[in-house]
Image: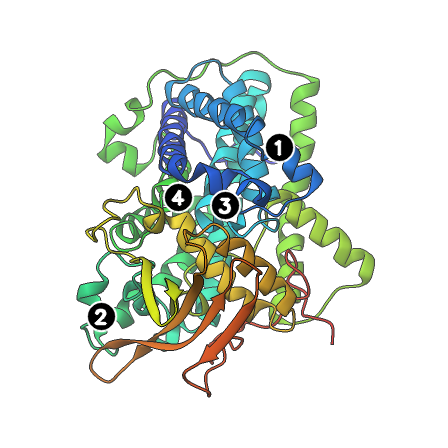
Amino acid sequence: MPDASFYPELGTRLEALVRTAYGVLMLATLLQALPEARRFFLSERWGGYAKSTRDVDAVQNPVVMPLFVAAWFLAAAALATGWWSPWPAILNLAFCRYFFIHMRWKGILRGMGAPGFIAYWVGLVVCLFEVTARFAPEVRPLALLVAQVDLACIMLTAGIYKFAAGYPQNHGMELGLCNPMWGYWWRWYIKRRPASPVFWTMNQLAWGTEVVAALLMLVPATREIGGLLILVSFAFIATQIRLGFLCEMVMAGSLIFIPPDGWIAGWFPWIGWIGGAAPAVAGEAGSAGAVLRVALWTYLALLPLAYGGLYYNFYARRRLPALVQRVLERYTNFFGLILWRVFSVDLVNFFIRLSRRTGERLTAIAPLGDLHASGYRGAWSRFNHVGEMICLTSLFTTLKYYPSNDVLFQERLRRYARTLPHEAGETLVFEYVSVVKRDTRFDWVPVGEYQVDPANGAITTRWIDPEFSPHAGHRDSPLHEGDVPGSYVPASR
């Protein structure tokens, strides 16, 4: 077994700070989602975003779901206060695992995308800390090591994808900043020159910081610097991009790289006291510790193989032998392992305008990104919630990810359309607007529309620009058609 000096350290009070911060952020996430609960947490049978199946309907129905959400609130509150450890952490992880990972490919909410993925990941880390503190304290250093390597892999994956998807060529951040679905300050950024050094610098820092920080996280002597880089970078992103509480969750997760005797703790000695009392530590746990140790070492050993398989599927555009491929996909989907493609060019170079059509008259359903528009004030409105932006974006990226599977897109489009307000005789219009770079500024160019008749589900399309294809990825993107949702295997021809 490795020497004790091989393992990272995290003070018990800082560990409590991570738990408290996560509990507070989870409460905020649930509170923000509460006005949207009918759509987010119910199946389509009751007006929600989840595809109706027997197992989904058994959980996501108007009777069971309120009980689950109430229990989730209580678990998050208990995490924030440190009460009844480790059971609230286990309960919270079960809810996060179901809604953010299990439901990722079973509804148009997509498990709430990147914010849901990070909420699950930090919840898993907190649960590991709480369980080992109670039942297997001797395994806590190994649990911390696995968490640090896991986050490093996530960030490395995200940075590599940005590098491959156009960020070095200055295609990425600037499009999101000018997109009303995502940027807070799009009114200011849209007037800037696309070739501005500000955008170029942001793009290089976006992929470069994630790659460099990830590599630093993997080296014992520089772990703390890597964690600090991620913390600072996501603190800045939180001021620019509408991502719910994703940035704050990542910042809380990056605190696991701060050792009790490191230079950050030396500069800010008060940081370890914010989390309250340290968790209680039991004696040697025997068999519980042995089981956890084997499970953690196994996960750590398989991590590079799992990511290697995903990289091979996506970047080499090849599938593994049938049995190996099947095992890989079941393993990665169970643990929620993905190639993190958040905020890439194919996601942020368009947005959707929603309208109701009666004859020749169009009535806007909601303005996107405008916190001061009449009738949709404040960040609590449906169309300012990050989950809604994820729904709309993932709905229309289906056209790019699965261009040959038009049935999948139409089924998702009809399901979303049924949740929009409309009167009898009205049709619903989804206008596809491209974010285009001009010489001196950015422009929003409507290129086409999808029209849905809620009465019979009929879908018609009209394209203003005949040369534009919603199925095509950006020229600098490695995007290719996938086989099925949940797999990076290229589509069978």
Q: CA distance from mark 2 to mark 3?
A: 30 Å
Q: Position of residue 83 (x, y in %)?
A: 43, 14
| x and y, in percent, of residue 275 in the image | 33, 23
Q: Nearer the viewer, residue 449 or 315?
A: 449
Q: CA distance from mark 3 to mark 1?
A: 20 Å
Give the Cα separation between the discs numbered 2 and 1.
44 Å
Task: Read off the residue under disc 4.
Answer: 250
Q: Which residue was labeled with disc 1?
A: 59
Instruction: Rate crowding at label 1 as few (under 14), some (14 to 19) or many (20 or more) other CA atoms within 10 Å.
Output: some
Label 4 – label 2 distance at C-alpha: 28 Å
Image position of 374 (left or right of 389): left
Residue depth check, mark 2 versus mark 1: number of the one nearer the observer: 1
Foreground of the two, 217 or 133: 133
Q: Are marks 3 and 1 in contact (CB under 8 Å)?
A: no
Identify the amino acid type marked 4.
Val
Q: Where is the C terminus found, in terms of image quarters? A: bottom right
Give whichever of 148, 458 is nearer the camera.
458
Name which of mark 4 and mark 2 comes first in the sequence.
Answer: 2
Image disc number at residue 161:
none
Pointer 2: what residue? 190
Nearest to N terminus: mark 1 or mark 4: 1
Q: Amino acid at mark 2?
A: Ile
Q: Please tell me the numbered disc located at residue 117.
A: 3
Q: What kind of residue is marked 3?
A: Phe
